[in-house]
Amino acid sequence: MKHLLPGVRVLAVLVSAVVAPGAATAAADNGVLIESFIARATDGNPRHTEADILVRRDGSLLVAWSDFYAGSRDDAPARISAAVSNDGGRTWQARATLQENTGGANVMSVSFVRSRTGDVLFFFLQKNSLTDLKAYVRRSTDDARTWGEPVLVTADPGYHVMNNARVIQLRSGRLLAPVASTKQVGTKNDDFRTSVYLSDDDGRTWRRSRTLLSAPKRGAMEPGLVELKDGRVMQIIRTQTGFIWRSFSSDGGETWTDASPWDIESPESPATLAVTPGGDWLLVWNPKVVWSNPEKTVLGANHGGARTPLASMVSADEGRTWSRPRNLEGNPESTFAYTSVTFHDGRALLTYYDFPKGGKLLSLKFKSVPLAWFRTSD
């Protein structure tokens, strides 16, 4: 394995870019939606995806993402780049490299967690082959200015997928990293199984949960987690069945109930579920939609359904009832997925890719949405 470089040098440009906090500006906009492109794709940089956002203590936003520089396939070369915004996401400073490509193929898929200790944890994947994908974590004790050496999260052999913005910290302090694993990806039957890696020492050591969850067809994929008010943890799972599946843990992620379909339809696309500071649930996902126009009817051949629109809805009772869905993006000629959600000053700060149909360029988009917007009718 190649040696992973500390982040002091590569983040110097990011540190110098922070000149003034932008949180007050964003909060003052009340009901205004703020949107921008963090990184636009080009032929030489064809894919910018799988991001997460950290709000620094000075109010600036640090975003990091998978920056593909020689192709747009999942196994194309990629580094992890980062950029800073001082104005609530309206504009972004020039990007710098947060994590060099140390994999046989790439590094990708960012999760940030500000631990209760005050440290910032930066998770990423290192992809070496179709049978070897591992998750790592690096630590910052100075608010994401410099980074320590990587710690291996998924020590078991195999191909371990962890989406961006997926790691959570329970009220107990335990860290949970949800993973979908298979022996080899790209086969006729990948047979993904989900599990959760747990840490009780603030990310310094990790172990896998005792339960592996399965689903039909290609398997149980790209899990996400939320902690319920009663202390249980719910896991949501991407499947090829036309529905999001879910499972529950009553012991902090050690063991899980059998996975079963939730009553939320979705193509084979990752959904993002997050708990707002007030305790509501925010779901961002691609609903099951059939697009029609006089020239063509799109039944959604891509992943069992098109990844458009990108919709949202809110629940005040932990998923028993939901607000009317609102589209964050509604263009049927483009697709949107791999959303991150960060809450700050009464807003949801989102990132996701914007991928026009028929093209090969995936750009990274940012949107800042007041929480009240999600409950308002279109």
Image (tube, helix red, strand yellow):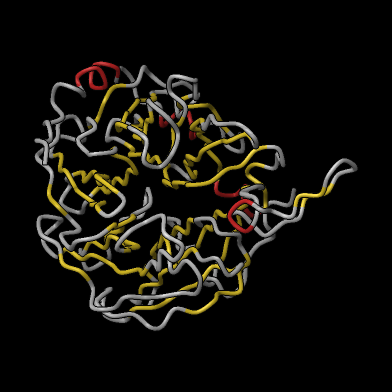
Residue 106: x, y in percent?
A: 29, 37
Q: Which residue is drawn at 49% across and 63% down?
A: 238
Q: Residue at x 19, y 35 (%)?
A: 102
Residue found farthest to the right? 294
Decide: is 12 above or below 263: above
Q: Which residue is drawn at 42% across and 43% down?
A: 344
Q: Residue at x 47, y 66 (%)?
A: 218
Task: Give the side of residue 305 with respect to residue 162, left or right.
Answer: right
Q: In which quarter of the image is the N terminus?
A: top left
Query: What is the quadrant of residue 212 in the picture?
Result: bottom left
Towards the viewer: 357 or 353: 357
Towards the viewer: 77 or 244: 77
Task: Give the side of residue 31 with respect to residue 74, left or right.
Answer: right
Residue 155: x, y in percent?
A: 15, 59
Residue found farthest to the front? 188
Q: Can residue 124 be seen in this view?
A: no
Q: How many marks?
A: 0
Residue 175: x, y in percent?
A: 23, 61
Task: Give the side of residue 100 with respect to residue 357, left or right.
Answer: left
Decide: is 346 above or below 97: below
Q: Can residue 302 be seen in this view?
A: yes
Residue 122: x, y in percent?
A: 24, 43
Decide: is 75 above or below 158: above
